[in-house]
Amino acid sequence: MKKYSLVALLLALCLCAGLLSGCGSQAAASAAAPETAASEEAATEAAGETAEAPADAPADNAAEEADSALEEEPVEEIPEWEYEPIEYPIADGNVTLDYWITWELSPNTIYDDISEHICLKELADATGVNLNVLAQSQAAGDTNTNLMLASGDYPDMIGGFKYTTGMDAAIEDDIVVDIKDDIAEFCPDYYKYLMEDDSKYWQAVQTDEGHIGAFVTVGTVAEVADGTMTYTYMMDELGFTADKINTVDAYAEYLTAAKNKYGMAAPLYMPGDFVFANDVLASAYGVSLKIDPMTGDLPWFVEDGVVKSGYLQEGYKEYVTLLHDWFEQGLLDSDTASHIVVDKNDDLIGLIANKQVAIFHQHDGLIDLFANLSGEEVVAIPLPTVHEGDQLHIGGAQDAISGESGVVITTDCDEYELAMEFMNYCYTDEWALASNYGVEGTTYDMVDGEPVFQDWTWQGSASGGNFSSTMMDYTFLAQVDMNVDTPGMSKAAMECKDIWNANIDNQNDYPDAAAMTADENSEYNNYAGDVITLIQTSTAKFITGDQPLDEVEAFQQQLIDTGIEECAAQKQAAYDRYMSRD
């Protein structure tokens, strides 16, 4: 089905209303027509009475009376949307929807085939709709999906859909259905999620053209999950507590003490670009400097609606000056520039295991591994600020929600309304619990009203599976993320996020959902490569002393001459469109 009949009918009705009313808001004009006609008759009668009035009557009485009559006309208000849940099941079990996805079972799976998955039976029992999962392997997923799209023969739905030229193009190319106008009616639970918290999700899932094509994963509480760590024994021996290693100066004092006591060659481990992930340390100076190691994109931040590059700010000079001083003091590895640009690497793991580093930056999920490798407790420490009590506005937790990818309904779906209501079930409380925790009594139990995983799920099954493979066997199609923590995490691991999120927000972070157009991307890429090369060359030199710090201003002017402001202009245009979404 290339177009669905309900929307076509609505468009036709809107067109007729537009022709009858002539101009203005079609729905409002149509609803107000009888009252307007009555008002015109009242105005005509008032005008007739004025013509027969005495000559000395004020000339504007008729106009005042007409205005008064119009003001007294009742204004019909558009009723607010009210949540009305859908009653499930919605079908009798004889309807099947084809669902294409790149996803494969783990090697330790309890199933012989994806069709045996327990979640498919649970979905069919609850909704009355059978889901035929057309699962593609990770190795061949992209290739097979591209071939399928090129054939023009689409399944009813596609999971994890992402179109090379964007969601707007996927809709314009007649592949994906624009579901925006039907979400409130057929997907009330999804709509409720999108409209909560000042409609921020509703804004994020829209495209620049105002379309919504994807069902995205919602409900995730954005949290900073990467941060700085150290050892408990080391703090005890050096006379520090974790809460007091919280400023740039406190970091330097602690690193110096560790270097002197333990003879460390480099007590602070940094990636090769001298910038931690999430701009830790750089954010203390109000700038974003981390070039994305996966996409190679430049970092940007926003102040008072203006998109800025951290490399052009005073904070950049303060940052490289600090690291230059630390480099000179031997707090950084003299060979830092040769490190890879991400934090997770074998060299760092070895240093942590041998306790040859005092502060390092890692993900909270690895903290227990580091404790096991080193034989010492590893704990999180606060993200550094310049002054105690400062609030960080860059590198905070962002909702990575974007309407550019997710589950989509294709234009070949003959059961559009049914597919909409089926997807809505994935946002109900019932499925949110099942799709995050599995089967009650098998993978989890309810304890004091809260789901708690059974011990076997994380201790390892008889087949050799771990927690992740167990969850693959018992959960599927999780559209509401309940922020499930991996069972068995230590107290230190559980406390990481509280410590790292205590003094940081994403107030000045550039929104992930702000997307450039093809033309903007082209203009951006005309300059970005040369800008990045200049940044990577000069930043390391300023810190190591190969380039004097008094040349920072000249470097910033060189960035401008190379086109960094032209790049910023494209990012600004994308940001402005994002902020103007209804």
Image (cartoon, rainbow, N blue to C red):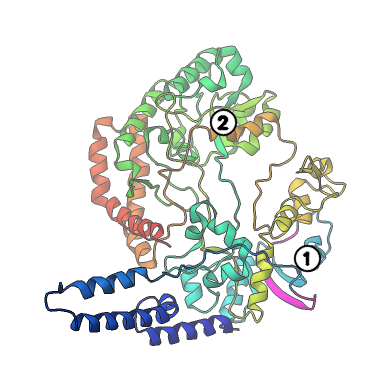
Q: Which residue is mark 1?
A: 126
Q: Position of residue 514 (x, y in %)?
A: 43, 57
Q: Is residue 545 left or right of residue 17?
A: left
Element carrying mark 1 = helix
350 within the magenta span: no
Q: Which of the two residues, 462 or 124, is positioned nearer the viewer here?
A: 124
Can you tell which quarter of the image residue 378 is in? Answer: top right
Q: Which of the two residues, 195 or 214, is positioned nearer the viewer here?
A: 195
Residue 347 is at least partly visible in this image:
no
For the record, the magenta segment spans 91-105
Q: Is residue 485 above or below residue 40?
A: above
Residue 139 is at least partly visible in this image:
yes
Q: Is residue 239 left or right of residue 29?
A: right
Mark 1 or mark 2, which is nearer to you? Answer: 1
Q: Residue at x 56, y 18 (%)?
A: 241
Amino acid, disc 2: Ile
Where does the N terminus fall, quadrant-wise?
bottom right
Q: Is residue 444 above or below residue 156?
A: above
Element carrying mark 2 = helix
* Residue 499, numbered circle: 2
Q: Residues within 10 Å of mark 2 (few under 14, many from 20)?
A: many
Q: Residue at x 84, y 63 (%)?
A: 112
Most extreme residue toward the left is: 56
